[in-house]
Image (tube, rainbow, N blue to C red):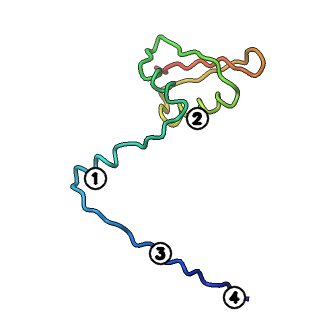
């Protein structure tokens, strides 16, 4: 049996002409979606080499923090964690030299 052909037509592209400057500005801006770990990154940016950022997180959040820090601050940080009460972990983030 042959498949019935779809009656949908493809939508034509809609174009606009931009100046080179405006195109560069659009490419450089990030979307409005923010990671739930963005506040950690903001705190880390101002962190000195002699300070450690410490907070509590669940096991899944610890992995999310590790991934976020690796994507945004690769080679600039060290993440350590230790299990505390129940399923919670204490996370320590420090800047590498």
How many labels, in total? Answer: 4
Mark 3 or mark 2, whichever is nearer to me: 3
Dot 3 or dot 1: first in sequence order is 3
What secondary structure is found at the residue carrying circle 1? Answer: helix
| Image position, residue 32 (x, y; %) | 44, 41
Whole-Å distance between the Cαs marked 2 and 1?
A: 30 Å
Horizontally, residue 1 falls left or right of residue 21, namely: right
Dot 2 or dot 4: first in sequence order is 4
CB contact under 8 Å: marks 3 and 4? no
**Residue 28 is drawn in which quadrant?**
top left
CB contact under 8 Å: marks 2 and 1? no
**Residue 84 is drawn in which quadrant?**
top right
Write down the residue under mark 3. 10
Q: What crowding class fits label 4: few (fewer than 14 Cα within 10 Å), some (14-19), or many (20 or more)?
A: few
Q: Residue furthest right?
A: 86
Dot 3 or dot 4: first in sequence order is 4
Q: What crowding class fits label 1: few (fewer than 14 Cα within 10 Å), some (14-19), or many (20 or more)?
A: few
Write down the residue under mark 2. 67
The residue lying toward the viewer, choosing from 6 and 49, is: 6
Write down the residue under mark 4. 2
Write down the residue under mark 1. 23
What secondary structure is found at the residue carrying circle 4? Answer: loop
Point 49% across, 33% down: residue: 74
Horizontally, residue 24 falls left or right of residue 49, namely: left
| Image position, residue 53 (x, y; %) | 53, 16
Dot 3 or dot 2: first in sequence order is 3
């Amino acid at each position: 049996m042959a498949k019935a052909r779809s009656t949908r037509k493809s939508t034509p592209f809609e174009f606009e002409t931009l100046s080179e400057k405006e195109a560069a500005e659009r490419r450089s801006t990030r979307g409005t979606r923010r990671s739930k770990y963005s506040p950690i990154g903001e705190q880390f940016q101002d962190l000195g080499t002699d300070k450690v950022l410490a907070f509590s997180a669940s096991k899944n959040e610890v992995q999310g923090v590790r991934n976020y820090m690796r994507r945004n601050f690769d080679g600039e940080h060290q993440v350590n964690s230790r299990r505390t009460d129940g399923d919670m972990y204490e996370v320590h983030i420090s800047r590498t030299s």
